[in-house]
Image (tube, grey):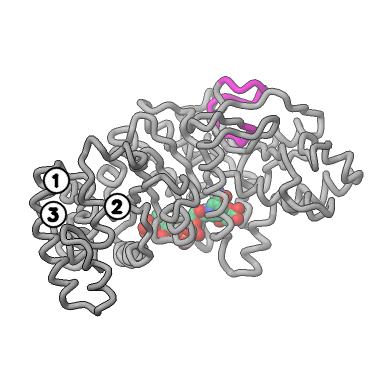
Amino acid sequence: MAFMAAGAAPSSSSAASALMPTRPETSPLQFFHAYAARRSLFRLPSRTRRSQLVCSLDATKQAVQEQSPTVKGAAAGRTDCFGVFCTTYDLREEEETKSWKKVVNVALSGAAGMISNHLLFKLASGEVFGPDQPIALRLLGSERSFQALEGVAMELEDSLYPLLREVSIGIDPYEVFEDVEWALLIGAKPRGPGMERADLLNINGQIFAQQGKALNAVASRNVKVLVVGNPCNTNALICLKNAPDLPPKNFHALTRLDENRAKCQLALKAGVFYDMISNMTIWGNHSTTQVPDFLNARIDGKPARQVIRDDKWLMEEFTKTVQKRGGVLIQKWGRSSAASTAVSIGDAIRSLITPTPEGDWFSSAVYTNGNPYGIAEDIVFSMPCRSKGDGDYELVTDVVIDGFLWDRIKKSEAELLAEKRCVMPECMQDDELCEITEDTMLPGEK
Ligand SMILES: NC(=O)C1=CN([C@@H]2O[C@H](COP(=O)(O)OP(=O)(O)OC[C@H]3O[C@@H](n4cnc5c(N)ncnc54)[C@H](OP(=O)(O)O)[C@@H]3O)[C@@H](O)[C@H]2O)C=CC1
Ligand SMILES: O=C([O-])CC(=O)C(=O)O
């Protein structure tokens, strides 16, 4: 609670009012102020910071006087600062990046949902962006979830993460996405009973169109966008189409969970630990038509087929297990994968900000324009990628594609083209109708 007590709520802070939800309740505003106050200690120009410093220190000294001897003892040797404030209050704007990396601004939608509940704590701990990377978290919710968002923010605060420099909550993507360098779009409406898949595409399409427009208007010009909310490939396509001023290449849909699932199955079959599995591509849609590529995968550096020597298993059981893993998990758990999805989001981010090990690659669903494989342009399709660690990636060219693989890839491509026809008929060349086949299922759907 020290942060909250010390930061006399800066109601005049423009950053605070910019992100503040326009709702009359007092409690959300109080919380918002608390988090904004914490940010202002790091970011306000030195003059403002100094006047806050004075009143904050007064508050802190008073708090120390009222506290136990242990706490008093800890502060006894210092008269000008207390605890965590010693490191933060003395930072001058121009010196910030000498001792710390510049804060990375990360937005999450669906921040009160299951996946976010795992992911946020990984992000705040430094597990994803690194132990020397301060982070600001911007949580996007809705009227429906606002109270839950406050709860999430309170838990983050109580976790005392040294790298966590800001937590802000809001319901307007134009405010929450301002200047963000990463946007993790997790929130999406799940399919309800009796709902047609085309309806789901439509409803989520509207959410991702609005968020794309907001990113286009206010995010960092090089923002990296990772769409998780299903159907994630088509949601990512809608998002990038609504953000014409941002590079389409920067938009990803998450298929890293599928890659991880495929690695796990190969490791189990080969009787090796899963760090032996490399070059694992998931081609296509994050759906039951996805293609886990055992042809190019390697086990301890050797082709997976040579090690496993069971093509029937690879073509049938392996492929089906990976495609349907999400559904089996829902049957067991009664809800969809959340922890392993959060882990895979962390993996996906790390793969873009650290150089890919020599000869290896990772899977991500990205925009197909200019792809070297002959996959239809203008969709978001999972393909093998390599990164230099600068947030960007290139598509891998040294892969083999045989007839079996190509047939499967075309099936997933057809599915994505059908999804696109349903949500963006204006983008299609012909008059084909929105027609979703039985195959068009999320991994978690039956
Ligand atoms: N790509 C992948 O590998 C995976 C993707 N997923 C997908 O990720 C998404 C999030 O999963 P999870 O966190 O478990 O889901 P939760 O149900 O726990 O949370 C989803 C969040 O979505 C938001 N949401 C946005 N619009 C709506 C709406 N119209 N109706 C209801 N909720 C809405 C809600 O937040 P708010 O009210 O704040 O907007 C809610 O908190 C799902 O679409 C899921 O299918 C899941 C696993 C793997
Ligand atoms: O279908 C779902 O919501 C869950 C999902 O994507 C998965 O587990 O891969």
State which quarter of the image contains the N terminus.
Answer: bottom left
Q: Which mark is residue 14?
A: 1
Q: Which residue is drawn at 35% across and 42% down?
A: 100
The range drawn in magenta is 370-385
Question: Disc 2 marks which amino acid?
Answer: Glu
> Of the residues tagged 1 and 3, which is closer to the observer?
3
Residue under numbered circle 2:
166
Determine the secondary structure under disc 2.
strand
**Residue 101, x across and y down, in percent:** 37, 40
> Residue 292, image x and y in percent?
72, 42
Is residue 136 shown in magenta?
A: no
415 lies above or below 6: above
| Marks 1 and 2 in Cβ contact (< 8 Å) | no
Q: Which mark is residue 157?
A: none
The amino acid sitting under disc 3 is Leu
- Mark positioned earlier in the residue sequence (1 or 3): 1
Q: Reading the chain from its start, which is encountered first: label 2 or label 3?
A: 3
Q: Earlier in the sequence, mark 1 or mark 2?
A: 1
Whether the residue carrying mark 3 lies under 8 Å from ligand 1 is answered with: no
Real-space Cα separation, disc 1 to disc 3, in angstroms: 19 Å
Q: Distance between the residues labelled 1 and 2?
A: 15 Å
Q: Which of 82 and 194 is in front in this view?
A: 82
Circle 1: is it few (<14), some (14-19), or many (20+) Cα within 10 Å?
few
- Quickly name the residue at label 3: 53
Determine the quadrant in which ligand 2 lies.
Answer: bottom right
